[in-house]
Amino acid sequence: MNTFKTFGLMFFLTLLLVWAGGAFGGRVGAIFALVIAGAMNFFAYWFSDKVILKIYRGKEVSETEEPELVGAVRELSQRVHLPMPKVYILPMETPNAFATGRDPQHAAIAASQGILKLLDRDELMGVLGHELAHIRNRDILISTIVATLAGALMLISRIAGWSAMFGGFGGRGRRGGGNIIVLLLLIIVVPIAAILIQMAISRSREYAADAGGSMISGRPLGLAGALEKLEKGVARRPLNASPATAHLFIVNPLRGGRMVGLFTTHPPTKERVARLQKIAREMGQ
């Protein structure tokens, strides 16, 4: 199912870029946009995880450098017979983590310096179990593709905004009125579409990864405690992150304003904690 969603999103991106290219440059613009879309889809599939790790300055670490973190990832991976993912440290005090990659054979888990300082071992194991659940469920490819897709949509909207500001779109010809409508759609609707796409794939998969991670780590209450600490930690030290990549993290790294709360890509932490507490009761904890 996730494979179908991934290629569906790639197809959607292609159609959207071709439509935008046609609106800007007619038939030539549409053909040019089709070539760009093909290149973006290829790049997103093979390289977007590396770009995301680069954006957040992730540094791959060994078990010698980070014995507790890498050792915990190894222990949990072996427990569920997953290939050992690469482990990265993000040089930032904001407490957070994410998983990325094409598939379980090419996966990576990234944790911030802040999360290692904030969580105890049970809580850290709960978070790592959550990220391994994303890898086992093959959420990581679609999440990484969506980050690229959302970034492309927001870029289209920004270009449209600049074009409208400087009058480079539509001119004074007979089609000017229609072009203004297209501009408004690009400026207003496209960013909302990007957020809605993130929400559609993110909220349900977070609940599933919480449940799966609890089974992997055996620590649902550890994960629940970690989520509460992480939410408070992010509120104190919000991350200057791109909204296009916010859905990758275990908790929303962005803070500020009602619109952020309205369009958050993550389910409410309170609800996640309640579900984890129910799982713990069912496990006899």
Image (cartoon, rainbow, N blue to C red):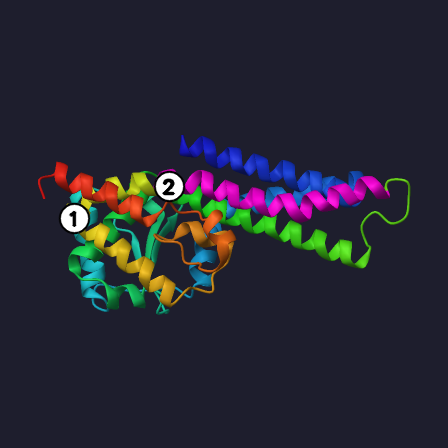
Q: Is residue 43 magenta?
A: no
Q: Quick check: marks 2 and 1 in contact, CB under 8 Å?
A: no
Q: Residue 219 got which mark? A: 1
> Is residue 32 left or right of 51 when viewed as pictured?
right
User: Which one is in front, 257 or 279?
Assistant: 257
Which residue is drawn at the image coordinates 19% and 46% (left, top)?
A: 220
Residue 247 position (above or below residue 112): above
Disc number for residue 256: none
Residue drawn at 59 percent across, 40 percent down: 13
Q: Earlier in the sequence, mark 2 or mark 1?
A: 2
Tell me residue 230's x, y (percent).
30, 59
**Quadrant occupied by the N terminus:** top left
User: Three-letter amino acid code at disc 1?
Assistant: Arg
Residue 73 can be seen in this image: no
**Which residue does the numbered mark 2 point to in the structure image?**
139
Q: Which residues are magenta?
A: 176-205
Q: Amino acid at mark 2?
A: Asp
Check the picture and name the quadrant holding the C terminus: top left
Whole-percent x, y for residue 9 in the image = 52, 37
Does residue 259 appear anywhere in the picture? yes
Give the SS element for disc 2. Answer: helix
- The residue depicted at 32 percent of the width and 44 percent of the height is 134
Residue at left offset 25%, top offset 68%: 117
Cα–Cα span, label 2 and label 1: 21 Å
